[in-house]
Structures are given as structure tokens and as C-alpha cells.
Image (tube, grey):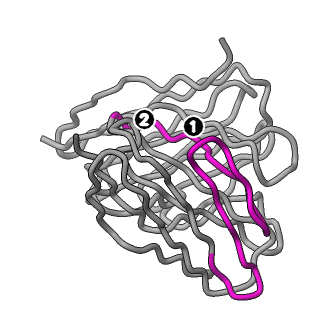
Amino acid sequence: GIQVEQSPPDLILQEGANSTLRCNFSDSVNNLQWFHQNPWGQLINLFYIPSGTKQNGRLSATTVATERYSLLYISSSQTTDSGVYFCAVPPKGGGGNKLTFGTGTQLKVEL
Amino acid sequence: DGGITQSPKYLFRKEGQNVTLSCEQNLNHDAMYWYRQDPGQGLRLIYYSQIVNDFQKGDIAEGYSVSREKKESFPLTVTSAQKNPTAFYLCASRRGTADYGYTFGSGTRLTVV
């Protein structure tokens, strides 16, 4: 099956700093999603981004499908941004749209 | 408010016991999923169901069982055959047939004592 790798695995930022998280995938995909898991375990969908760039407030994401990677940008980070960020992709043939998740980037934003 | 409710939040199991994790949604979503998360790792799919009375194995189904008798409910049973059940379990649902629009529950943390 498809392999999904994320980097860096861990990241510590001072509040107000910017960061870029990367997601590489081993095969072509029809779409890609970014999720944020807060420290209490709740997963929230951030972006559905099969290609191109999307922005939502201080967050933006870019997927370059032809080169099999996606980037998540966090600007002016806040302590509430802490948690784990996952990217996830479905199998190309559909297959119930079950997602394959990367291993995540653990982000801690400090004052 | 519409959403997914998982219960209990914390569950302790003795060796050799079966336990059932509850997942209920009032979003009218057709598809439901169970994922397992281990520390420092991503989510791995256990079982999924696209319609009532039908479900398929995911990547790590051994030692688990599910049922889908109602659209709203997708309980997961962790059987004694699951050798390493201590983990965080997340239930999700998805609207329609589009491959986006996932909603996740807040999870159940299962610990074997």
C-alpha cells in the first residue's frame, strides 16, 4: 500500500514563530487531507487539498501532486496550535475511502 | 449539536476479557470507521462500514470485531485474542461518497491491567 511520511517528527516553537510541516507520499493520490489532533486527542480536519494551495487564517497548505508531497504552513504560531499534525490519503481506487495516515508531527508552541 | 460520541473515555481491561467500545453518531453519515493509535504513531484502520449490516476489515482487524445494526451505531469489541490492546481508539464517520468530510470522535483510551 501507499506509504506516507511526515517530517519533522517533533517541533518546538516560540509563540509567534512560523513553521513548515512536510508530508511525502509514495504513490499518486486523488486527494490529501491535513488533520490537527489536540492534546486531548480530538482530531479536526484542517484541509482537503488534492492539489494547489489553500489558506485558512494563519494556516495554509500546498500539495504538489506530481512531486508527491504536501506542505502545511503555520504562521504566527500560538500555544493553541500545539498538538499532532497528520496528513492522510485514501487509496487511489477508492476502497471505502479509508485513509492512510502519516506518523505525524508533534508540535509544541511555548510562550 | 451533531457529532460523534465515543464512550467510555477511559477503559481498563483485565487479561482475557472482552470489552466493547461504543461509537454513536447523529450526523446521518453512511460510513463509519475505527482507528487505533499507538504512542508516537499515526492512526491504523481496524474496521470500516459503508452501509448498515455491512463492514470490512482494515489493516489490523485481528483480535477485533464490529457490528453495524443501525446507521447511528458502530461498536467495536476488543477480544481476548488481541494480544496488545492498550491503545487510543478513535471512531470516525464520513458524509456521502466523497473522500473528505470526516468527523472524528474524542476517543477511548484502553489500558490492560
Instruction: Please rate how many residues cluster around mark 2, counting C-alpha atoms within 10 Å: few if below 14, some from 14 to 19, many from 20.
Output: many
Q: Horizontal placement of A17 versus A53: left or right?
A: left
Provide the secondary structure element on which disc 1 rests: strand
| Kind of residue sitting beneath label 2 | Gly
Residue A61 lies in the magenta-colored region: yes
Residue at position x 30%, y 49% from top? B87
Query: Where residue B76 appears, x then y in whole percent?
Result: 50, 39
Q: Which disc number belongs to residue B104?
A: 1
| Kind of residue sitting beneath label 1 | Phe
Asked if B113 appears above or below A54 in the picture, the reply is above
Residue pushed farthest top? B1
Query: Where residue B29 appears, x then y in whole percent?
Result: 78, 32
Chain at tag 1: B
Q: Which disc number belongs to residue B107?
A: 2
Residue toward you, A9 or A101 = A9
Chain at tag 2: B
